[in-house]
Image (cartoon, rainbow, N blue to C red):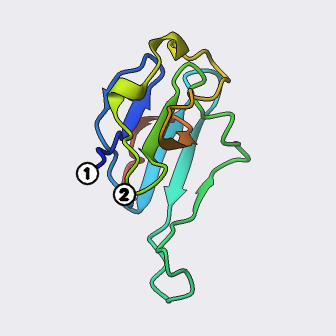
Amino acid sequence: MALRLTHRAEHGLIMEKPTFPLPAGKYLVTGDREVTSVLTVHPPDKSGKDKAGNQWWELADGATLYDVTHLGCRSARYTPAAINNPCTPSNVRTTGFPVYPGADMPIVNGCRKQDYTVLIAVGLPAKQ
């Protein structure tokens, strides 16, 4: 059985698996630069139109994803490229780390990779 190598940070550390779906609500987010914005995460589509249950989101006041992305942090999810392919930490080349701002996370032999953007949640807006 192939192991599942989950998420790695820009320094090559294996990170805790994030919770999906993200609870619907409003989050105060920043990239720790100039912009702080309210991220509204909507509940997964229950109408049946989106069979995958994807969520949609939006940022307030014209902020962009780039504005609230913490550029120094990188993350990726690694999963086996094939059923019997080992996707293990031993396949990771340590020379690929650290990953510098703006760069993609390294490719790992035997793995598929999905890069993630990192936002810093600094709070929840006060309830009105």
Amino acid type, residue under disc 2 in the picture: Phe
In this view, which residue lies farthest toward the right? 62
Q: Label 1, secondary structure: give it.
A: loop
> How many numbered marks are there?
2
In the displayed structure, would residue 3 be above or below residue 96? below
Amino acid type, residue under disc 1 in the picture: Met
Q: Is residue 90 left or right of residue 120?
A: left
- Quadrant of the rendered structure where residue 104 is? top right
Q: Residue at x 48, y 21 (%)?
A: 10
x, y (%) of residue 81? 49, 49
In the displayed structure, would residue 13 be above or below residue 61? above
- Quadrant of the rendered structure where residue 57 is? bottom right
x, y (%) of residue 80? 42, 48
Disc 1 packing (10 Å; few <14; some 14–19; many ≥20): few
Q: Nearer the viewer, mark 2 or mark 1?
A: 1
- The tag on residue 20 is 2
114 vs 85, nearest the viewer:
85
50 vs 115, nearest the viewer:
115
- The tag on residue 1 is 1
- The tag on residue 22 is none
Q: Residue at x 45, y 72 (%)?
A: 44
Q: Residue at x 50, y 89 (%)?
A: 48
